[in-house]
């Protein structure tokens, strides 16, 4: 991806006239059935092209995407799926929704990504899949993870909800595992308020995922998201060939997502530029350790994140000084999924020691500053805060 120079100055519209024009196209159809899924089809075709895969299937959100992938692969009760604990809990919840059992692998301290060595150690005879997360906008070590998967014939579902346009050894994320799962939730790089996308090169999986997405309809296909009038104008027509959900993306959301996808370099480029600005502000501070991006990967920076390792400054003390200096939008990382109250009695401390050590240290800084002047002000706040606490 080429980052436009305009991302480092001026104001970028989060939602532009392009998205509004595409929404108007949908409204002009009057939601007639004969016009259904036209915008979604355009979005799917462009998304497949952008990510370099054969098939892209639009969903109502970026959780249903992973659920559908597991179901289409036949994963269910008695099966285990390996997930990281340091991420949004949806990655674990989809395993439970499929009736399978989540198994937590530890993370790497510097990259914060799932540790392939821990994944290998957590595999058992019941393991059927791995869901690695491209945490904060950057890929884990996919070569090592795919090697484990090949050895054990495991499905790999890339949870790339927090990234867009990032690469691993030159390959777009979402095109390396058998399945990629993107999110268009409001905080993500490109958004339609809510929405998601599945990517895959596997025709059989694509058809299965589409049928989970669309009520198990016989008339849908890898590149066809809805049944037509010709299908249903027959009293003998058999609609449902399998079980499924109504996980389809609405046309209005597809219109907005398509406009955002067309503007992806501008929108992602701004976040990368803001992250670079924060990195420059923190340069030389020996107690704030930014997430390491290895040379074989690019980072799309859903957030700019760093570990607070100061021996006497707590997370809350940093947050308070940041706020006092005029800062906004520093967040703590998610509580590790297996330590959430819903899992009480099932897991306990010590399961993933690296994740348990780094999670309380993480400072997540916003990168979605669409006015460059706001980004520069926040970088200045970071400099002052580090000086105050040094």
Image (cartoon, rainbow, N blue to C red):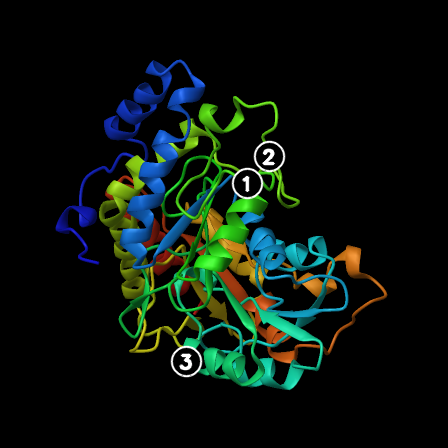
From the top left corner, tell me how far across and down residue 26 is, in percent.
35, 21
Cα–Cα gap, marks 3 and 2: 41 Å
Taking depth in this image into account, of 213 and 255 the one nearest to the observer is 213
From the top left corner, tell me how far across and down residue 236 is, in percent.
61, 28
Q: Quadrant of the C terminus?
A: bottom left
x 36%, y 58%: residue: 301
Q: Quadrant of the N terminus?
A: bottom left
**Of helix, strand and loop, which one carries label 2?**
loop
**Of helix, strand and loop, which one carries label 3?**
helix
x 61%, y 53%: residue: 90
From the top left corner, tell me how far across and down residue 353 is, in percent.
65, 79
* Nearest-to-viewer mark from 3 and 2: 2
Establish if 373 lies above or below 382: above
Cα–Cα gap, marks 3 and 1: 37 Å
Taking depth in this image into account, of 300 and 230 the one nearest to the observer is 230
Residue ID for mark 1: 218
Residue ID for mark 2: 239
From the top left corner, tell me how far across and down residue 173 is, in percent.
37, 63
**Which corner quadrant of the image does residue 164 belong to?**
bottom left
**Of helix, strand and loop, which one carries label 1?**
loop
Q: Earlier in the sequence, mark 1 or mark 2?
A: 1
x 46%, y 83%: residue: 144
Establish if 362 lies above or below 296: above
Cα–Cα gap, marks 1 and 2: 5 Å
Tag 3: Cα neighbours inside 10 Å, few (<14), some, or many (≥20)? some
Q: Earlier in the sequence, mark 3 or mark 2?
A: 3
Tag 1: Cα neighbours inside 10 Å, few (<14), some, or many (≥20)? some
Decide if residue 158 is in sight here. yes
Taking depth in this image into account, of 244 and 348 the one nearest to the observer is 244
Q: Are marks 3 and 1 in contact (CB under 8 Å)?
A: no
């Amino acid at each position: 991806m080429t980052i436009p120079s305009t991302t480092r100055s001026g104001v970028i519209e989060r939602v532009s006239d392009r998205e509004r024009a595409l929404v108007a196209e949908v409204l002009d159809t009057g939601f007639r059935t004969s016009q259904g899924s036209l915008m979604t089809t355009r979005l799917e075709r462009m998304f497949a092209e952008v990510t370099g895969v054969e098939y892209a299937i639009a969903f109502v959100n970026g959780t249903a995407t992973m659920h559908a992938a597991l179901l289409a692969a036949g994963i269910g009760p008695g099966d285990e799926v390996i997930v990281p604990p340091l991420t949004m809990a949806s990655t674990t919840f989809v395993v439970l929704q499929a009736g399978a059992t989540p198994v937590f692998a530890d993370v790497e301290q510097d990259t914060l990504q799932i540790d392939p060595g821990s994944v290998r150690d957590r595999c058992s005879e019941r393991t059927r899949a791995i869901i690695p997360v491209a945490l904060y906008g950057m890929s884990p070590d996919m070569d090592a993870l795919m090697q484990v998967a090949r050895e054990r014939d495991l499905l790999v579902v890339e949870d790339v909800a927090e990234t867009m346009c990032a690469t691993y050894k030159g390959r777009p994320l979402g095109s390396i595992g058998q399945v990629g799962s993107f999110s268009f939730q409001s905080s993500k790089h490109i958004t339609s308020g809510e929405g998601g996308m599945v990517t895959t090169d596997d025709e059989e999986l694509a058809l299965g995922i589409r049928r989970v997405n669309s009520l198990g309809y016989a008339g849908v296909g890898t590149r066809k998201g809805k049944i037509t009038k010709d299908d249903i104008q027959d009293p003998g027509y058999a609609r449902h060939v399998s079980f499924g959900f109504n996980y389809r993306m609405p046309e209005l959301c597809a219109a907005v997502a398509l406009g955002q996808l067309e503007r992806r370099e501008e929108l992602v480029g701004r976040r990368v530029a803001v992250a670079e600005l924060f990195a420059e502000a923190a340069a030389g501070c020996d107690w704030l350790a930014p997430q390491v991006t290895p040379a074989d990967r690019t980072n799309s920076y859903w957030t700019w994140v760093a570990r607070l390792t100061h021996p006497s400054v707590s997370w809350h003390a940093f947050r308070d000084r940041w706020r006092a200096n005029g800062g906004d939008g520093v967040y703590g990382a998610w509580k590790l999924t297996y330590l959430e109250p819903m899992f009480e009695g099932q897991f306990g401390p010590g399961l993933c020691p690296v994740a348990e050590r780094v999670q309380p240290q993480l400072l997540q800084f916003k990168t979605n500053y669409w006015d460059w002047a706001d980004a520069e002000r926040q970088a200045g706040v970071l400099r002052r805060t580090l000086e105050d606490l040094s």
